[in-house]
Amino acid sequence: MNKIKKWLDIRFLKFMVVGVVNTVVGTAVMFVMYNVFHQSYWISSASNYVVGSILSYFLNKYFTFESKKKSLSQVLKFVLNISLCYLVAYGIAKPTVTWMLQGQQGALRDNLAMVVGMVLFTLLNYIGQRAYVFKTN
């Protein structure tokens, strides 16, 4: 229980605030790409994370984790973390929601899969950023 409390501190609250900003911006990009520009599931969700990740890096680096470190290594760790979290979260979400909603319209399944992917991504991303990218000793 103490391990959980250790992770649910002010940094978690700041991460969630940054997450709200990223979610508003990224979700708008994703759903506009899918529903207005008729891009695929993968292009739409990836667009979300390209735009959101750039915003996330700077907000989490300076606001959430207050990292003063300036290094290419940290940027590369961030890109690796975001990429793995994206692939795992959306890779799980799409087939799972598709299987659960067999017989439903493709657009409904894809939109719901994107929402499920967002939730999974957020959890995995927080763990990765805190424990790996912006880790403090």
Image (cartoon, helix red, strand yellow):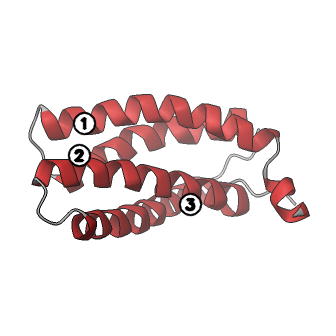
Q: Residue furthest right?
A: 2
SS at mark 3?
helix
Spatial CA distance of label 2 from label 3 is 20 Å
Q: Earlier in the sequence, mark 1 or mark 3?
A: 1
Q: Position of residue 32 (x, y in %)?
A: 21, 32
Q: Is residue 16 left or right of residue 44?
A: right
Compare residues 108 and 70 and report the one nearer the observer. 108
Task: Give the image quarter of residue 128.
Answer: bottom right
Three-letter amino acid code at the position of disc 3: Leu
SS at mark 1?
helix
Residue at 25%, 47% (x, y): give it.
Answer: 111
Q: Which residue is mark 2?
A: 44
Q: Crowding at label 3, few (<14), some or many (≥20) Cα neighbours within 10 Å?
A: some
Above or below for 80 versus 29: below
Q: Which mark is residue 31?
A: 1
Compare residues 127 and 57 and report the one nearer the observer. 127
Q: Is residue 48 left or right of residue 21?
A: left
Q: Is residue 121 visible?
A: yes
Q: Is residue 65 visible?
A: no
Q: Which residue is mark 3?
A: 124
